[in-house]
Image (cartoon, rainbow, N blue to C red):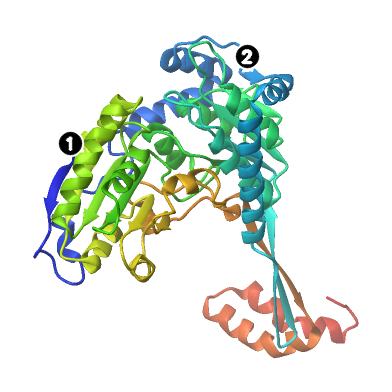
Amino acid sequence: MLERLDLRGLGDESGDDLASLLPRPQPGDAVSQDAVLQLIAQVKMDGDAAVRALTARFDGVDIADTLVPVSELSEAWERLSLGLRSAMETAHRRILEFHRAEAASGHTYERDGVTVRSVSQPVDRAGVYVPGGLAAYPSTVLMTVLVARAAGVDDIVLCSPPGPDGGLPATVLAAAHLCGVTEVHRVGGVQAVAALAYGTESIRPADVVAGPGNAWVATAKQLVAGDVGVAAAFAGPSEIVVIADASCPPAAAATDVVLQAEHGPGGRAWLVTWDPGCADAVCEAISQIVELSPRREETLATLEADGFVCLVDGPAQAALVANFVAPEHLQLMCEGAEELVGSIRHAGAVFIGPWAPASVGDYVAGPSHVLPTAGTARFAGALTTDDFAKRMHIVDVSEAGFDQLAPAVAELAEAEGLWAHAASVSRRKEWAASGVRP
């Protein structure tokens, strides 16, 4: 079920040789950018009519009005079981607290009569995408909307693909109610991203579009970046790499390899170990778990397409493999996990030890579970409040500070041939001497 890669005795200490030995998909490999661009252009040109046509084409339902009445959100919340309501409230509290604490505070820099204040300003309107289709994801509502809330965004619009009946799952609507979302649209896929980025007659454009999705959705976000704010991470199909040894029960490692694979095709599920016995036992346990899974077909689609067990020389080479793969989730279930994490440089989130399955991060640990996939953890991280805000600098210069820095400004401006830049400092004293205050 998992393809075996034996890397023992191969590769140098830098890990450079691994590039020719390990597969690594690129963002959007399975998607035609031209096809996505055509869909985006259709929405930009025809607005609601295009959204309706594309929803009928891809989701199989004809929806004239995508907006979900606010009353349906509160009704969905009231219908939740007490246990699920309590679980959502726990997640809500922890996610909001974490991101409020992580949100960048203001910074003031003072030197030589110049005071610069750096302040974080939230965007006016955020658009969040919550995937659907194979499953309902109320957790993604919390993991996107609450990050925007912690950043200070008040106006948040949510889009999610409709089911066969044209509606959205009650759990998604309930989570939207809990998070204070008042504008929810039954729109998914590329058409949702395009609508959030450029607007239609019924969906006002957002300043930022965030949230995970399939490769089509993630590619669409890449293609609208620049016209609208988009997180750097390619938040596509889910991934996990589990590093394990004989100290880890095989069933535990196997379950954790499978847990992200059950999201369905397009993701990655890897086991890395330096113990052949561990590899054999975990692979056997994976086969048993998959056969019992209610989502057997979805899980198999991931494991058979991009499921690997890598045999390595030891923990150092395991870390090299993990850094090369740059997975969305990395789980360290081995002796010396705390020391090994110091060698990890590229991963969306790292989970250490036997009591930290990635599922804890998916729901209640606190940080957003919207993480970089397809190797983009090499340069991008988790969704944070920074994705819903921007830095604004406020510069205040005293006369003494001006006197000290003006010569440097004039020299640099003259070197670049910018006369007015130089004059703005060289003539200010003349104006002041004549009684004209700048």
Q: Secondary structure at mark 1?
A: loop
Q: Residue at x 88, y 84 (%)?
A: 434
**Residue 220 percent location from the top left of the image:** 43, 35
Q: Secondary structure at mark 2?
A: loop
Q: Which circle, 2 or 1, is nearer the viewer?
A: 1
Q: Residue at x 54, y 52 (%)?
A: 367
Residue 13 versus residue 380 in the image, above or below = below
Return the disc, 2 or 1, that comes first in the chain's sequence.
1
Which residue position holds label 2? 65
Mark yes or no: residue 370 visible. Answer: no
Which residue position holds label 1? 1
Residue 218 versus residue 164 in the image, above or below = below
**Residue 71 percent location from the top left of the image:** 74, 20
Looking at the rendered structure, the kind of residue marked 2 is Asp
Looking at the rendered structure, the kind of residue marked 1 is Met
In the image shown, does 111 or 11 lie closer to the viewer? 11
